[in-house]
Image (spheres, rainbow, N blue to C red):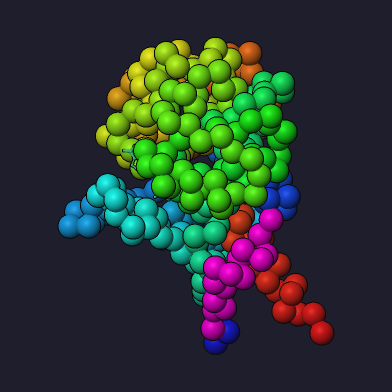
Amino acid sequence: MSDPPVVIWEDEVRELLTYSALVPRLEEALGHFSRRDSAEVIQPVRTTVALQKHRGFLGLMPTYMENLGVLSTKFVCFYNREAGSTLPATQATVVLLDPEYGNVKAVIDGEVITRMRTAAVSAISAKLLMRPEAEVLAILGTGIQALSHYNVFTEMFSFKEVRVWSRSKERAERFRDLVRGPVTLCVSAEEAVRGADAIVTVTRSTEPVLFGRWVKPGAHVAAVGACRPDWRELDDVLMKEAVVYADSREGAMAESGDVILSGAEMFAELGDVINGTKAAHREKTTVFKSLGMGVEDAVSAKLVFDQWKAKHSQP
Ligand SMILES: NC(=O)C1=CN([C@@H]2O[C@H](COP(=O)(O)OP(=O)(O)OC[C@H]3O[C@@H](n4cnc5c(N)ncnc54)[C@H](O)[C@@H]3O)[C@@H](O)[C@H]2O)C=CC1
Ligand SMILES: O=C(O)C1=NCCCC1
């Protein structure tokens, strides 16, 4: 009989996970994923089950990384909530299994993992694709992901200004009160992004909120929301003018309205750039379309579990 699984919940995950430990593991995982070597990664495109009555979806994200000895799946529910709803946009849990025996080793809160690994991957896209002299960051949206993106982008880069836009003045002010650092609140998305060197879109919008005509040539955009084939955050002009990168080519072709509906060509995966098989076009306007991948959750969960074991084996 195997031991019962350990349960590692939100406060403990927050304590165990740091961007400095997470970022190199995610870079390595993105590189492994793009090599398409089944001993390194088996990660099918997310399966989604519509929760029509609740305007949501259940996403199942199984992943096996043989060389790392990691078998996991994330269950993530995400919703297209009514405007003004205070219910969460996503809820997630990661289950870590023993690949040899098949038993569940740990059930881990997926909220902190989702917010930190998503923001960390956007920061990796900026590390690879943003101009090194970048001074101004703009964030569209002021929710959970906006906060984690603010945290990791200001930890990894030295921006002179961080601008933020929300449709609601109250939410923008709450965001300013929550962050540890300066932020300029903007009254429109256009005001926030005009002249910005890096732009992060982290809204629940299903229509474009960022338009190519506002974007400074050579800027880098990390587009994180709009994870359904008929949802948009970016307009056709931006998608067609930019060099487009994604976390997963298959994921973007199946799930990204910005990619599918614009007909934009996808140039490369981030992992291709990490592996040196595709160029990083820092000199051009670039879009990184993030959908989220199981490998990101798998290496994050392994890190949490390893740290948890180290902490609990201490005398
Ligand atoms: N790519 C990935 O790996 C992941 C993507 N996501 C996606 O990122 C987005 C943000 O997630 P959270 O920060 O957790 O959500 P949240 O609910 O905490 O924040 C959403 C933000 O979008 C704003 N918003 C809602 N509707 C809008 C509209 N029509 N126009 C402009 N702004 C609007 C809200 O005011 C809020 O500031 C969601 O679309 C979510 O599905 C979330 C997790 C992972
Ligand atoms: O990868 C994830 O986790 C998510 N991706 C898109 C929608 C919400 C969660």
Farthest residue to the right: give it: 315
Instruction: Give the left or right position of residue 10, taking residue 213 as reference.
Output: right
Foreground: 197 or 92? 197
Residue at 76% over, 80% down: 313
Residue at 68% over, 31% down: 159
Residue at 59% over, 38% down: 183
* Figure check: 263 above or below 182: above
Determine the image quadrant of residue 169: top left
- Give residue 116's position: percent from left, percent from top: 58, 51
Foreground: 239 or 138? 138
* Figure check: 30 above or below 96: above
Instruction: Give the left or right position of residue 202, taking residue 273 as reference.
Output: left
Q: Which residues are magenta?
A: 4-18
- Give residue 108's position: percent from left, percent from top: 53, 68
* Figure check: 170 above or below 287: below
- Give residue 309's position: percent from left, percent from top: 70, 74
- Give residue 120's position: percent from left, percent from top: 61, 44
Instruction: Give the left or right position of residue 198, taking residue 25 as reference.
Output: left
